[in-house]
Image (tube, rainbow, N blue to C red):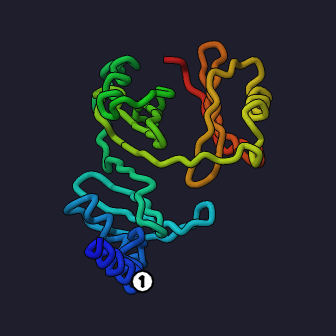
Amino acid sequence: MKRLGTFLALFMCAVLLFPAAATAKKISGPAAAKKLAKQKVKSAVVTEVDVDYENGGLLYEVTLIKGSREYNLKYRASDGKLMEYEWETEGIIKQYQSRKNLSKAKIKKKAKKQVKKAKINSVRLKYDDGLAEYKVKMKKGSKKYSLTYHAKTGKLLDYEWEIVKKSSSSKYIGVPKAKSIANKKVPGAQVVKVEYDKDDGIPVYEVEMIKGNMEYELKIHAKTGKILEYEQDMLD
């Protein structure tokens, strides 16, 4: 017991003299954020470190390049926790356009293999600068994932996850109001999905709708009700 008491006394002295050792690893500045990012993506070159504020908290966003991929990592300054992780392929060659698009079932299978035990929320075929892509949205625990696949080859082009915090719905317009706004924009369309998300830190409701052989996707500001994005595509 005497030895235990001595150990506890020494430990408390260490905490008082060196508080940083007893607390989480707070990021002291851009250099510390850069070091963390380089440990996460080994052999990558850091091109930019930005400071951002989200929900009143300080964040460090680090951009890196490694091979044909550009990485974006977002760290919380208070404890050094990685809150967002993303990479995307640079310089995609637009080839294989004569091929038939892979089925959504095959893309779902690839996504489930990429993020095991995650729930698939949606799979949409889109065109980005003439390139056919499948956008897959998934959720696992506190993380939301967004994966982009080449529609012809099934190659994973972009990969992203972010930790999502639960927010008080009283601040926002709510799902029924978001549906009403979407229905006014596309009269007669059927709402098939409404999901709360954050787009570059902005709270939004993502609404998916179907009318005839067309499908629609709207991003509505969760606080103001303003339509931020509107897309329409032919049903696959």
Q: Is residue 180 visible?
A: yes
Mark 1, other Cα within 10 Å: few <14 / some 14–19 / many ≥20: few
Q: Amino acid at mark 1?
A: Leu
Residue, far top: 212
Front in this rendered view, residue 66 or 8 = 8
- Toward which corner of the image does residue 222 lie, by quadrant? top right
Q: Position of residue 208 (x, y in %)?
A: 62, 27
Above or below residue 98? Residue 61 is: below
The residue located at (65%, 35%) in the rendering is: 218
Q: Residue at coordinates 47% horizontally, 69% vertically from top-left?
A: 77
As drawn, 16 above or below 161: below
Q: What residue would you read off at disc 1? A: 16
Of 95 and 138, the residue lying toward us:
138
Q: Residue at x 30, y 21 (%)?
A: 99
Dot 1: element? helix
Q: Quadrant of residue 94?
A: top left
Residue 51 x/y as whole percent: 50, 71
Q: Nearer the viewer, residue 37 or 216?
A: 37
Q: Nearer the viewer, residue 79 or 52?
A: 79
Q: Residue furthest bottom?
A: 17
Is residue 31 visible in the rendered image? The answer is: no
